[in-house]
Image (cartoon, rainbow, N blue to C red):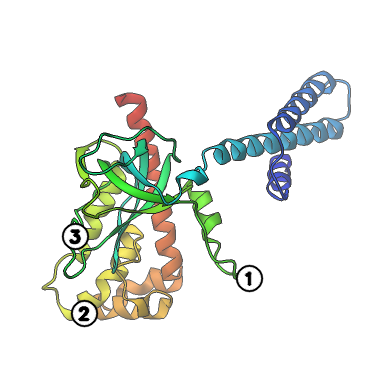
Amino acid sequence: MGLVAGAAWQVTQPALWRAESYAGLLLAALALGAAVWIAQRRAHRSVVWLLCALAAGLAMAAGCGARALAFQAQALDIALEGQDLRLTGIIAAMPEPAPWGTRFRFAVEHAQRAGKKEARPGRPVVVPPLVELSWPGARAGDRAVAQAPLKPGERWELSARLKAPHGLRNPHGFDQELWLWEQGVQATGYVRLGRAQARPQRLAQTGRHPVARLRQQLRDAIVAPQDAQPAWQRARGVVAALVVGDQNAIAAGYRQSSSTWNFSLESAFGAGCLTISSTSVRGPASAEFTKEFYASCDLSATWIGWVFGG
């Protein structure tokens, strides 16, 4: 209870405190921990438990506050918003196709100001370690670089423009900025493909994010065939959402209603396949859970690779 209360107390604060304040909370928690160790043989058990809860609450509040301060320190410098930057990094998640192009997470390893195509590299700059980029699709008559196939774990060098995350402030609406904060994304932007910019370059395929690569291969195997039967063409987006957590392949009219998800599956496989999906969970919620599960597995596999593979 102390851990939960401490976290709740910190996240409901209207603004972050200074680092010294969180250090003071941590020292207070350590002092209470020492008091618990001294009083555990003399004081009543209820007093010991109360001191333990207070120490845990203060320590949790200090940890949450310190982590938020460290995360805030990595925010995008306002002077870099809208500037052409040359980024080198790794695709950190399965790219998500859209009618206008592709959206993907990019773990930045190096950043510098982008000059002209023939100019010398600009000076290095500091940007957030994880950004979300959009790669626009080729338009009719556009001479820009066509969209290249992107895969998790690939190291790319590309030009982009970034900005701090922003979302609509509609009452009771989806908080895009908070959601990106929770995902660790501190900047969004798009890949620059004009003739004045250097072309994006695929540098190498690394061993990072193996689960995300497997997830993309499964998604492509499900949705790629163009000569499938009409029933499968309607259902394959729903199957991809349930198997790999990607809802982008679903037609717009099928995304929000679980009844239409069930209809698509029934038309493709028959009613017998709906025993779990129609009675246990709603389709969109199941797809989101699958997506988060794969993301957790991919993070674990990446950490294991760093520890044992260098």
Decide if residue 62 is on the left or right side of residue 138: right
For the point 61% across and 37% down, which residue is it? 69
Residue labelled with disc 2: 231
Query: Height in image: 225 above or below 189?
Result: below
Sequence order check: which comes first, mark 1 or mark 3?
1
Quarter of the rendering occupied by the C terminus: top left
Q: Distance between the Cα atoms at labels 1 and 3?
A: 40 Å
Indicate the secondary structure of the residue bearing disc 2: helix
Residue 100 x %, y %: 29, 67
Q: x, y (%) of residue 40?
A: 82, 23
Q: Callout 3 environment at 10 Å: few (<14), some (14 to 19), or many (20+)?
A: few
Seen from the viewer's position, the closer of residues 258 and 302 is 302
Quadrant of the rendering where the N terminus is positioned = top right
Mark closer to the observer (2, 1): 1
Q: Is residue 5 left or right of residue 247?
A: right
| Type of amino acid under label 2 | Ala
1 lies left or right of 217: right
Q: Secondary structure at mark 3?
A: helix
Mark 2 surroundings: few (<14), some (14-19) or many (≥20) residues within 10 A: some
> How far from the left and from the top, in percent, is residue 280?
46, 68
- Amino acid beneath label 3: Ala
Residue shown at the point (26%, 44%) measured from the top left: 116
Front tag of 1 and 3: 1
Residue that label 3 marks: 221
Gap in Å between the C-alphas at discs 2 and 1?
Answer: 40 Å
Chain-order first, disc 2 or disc 1: 1
Q: Quadrant of residue 42?
A: top right
Residue beneath label 1, please? 171
Say which element carries label 1. loop
Query: Pointer 3 and pointer 2: residues touching (CB < 8 Å)?
Result: no
x then y, percent, for residue 282: 45, 70
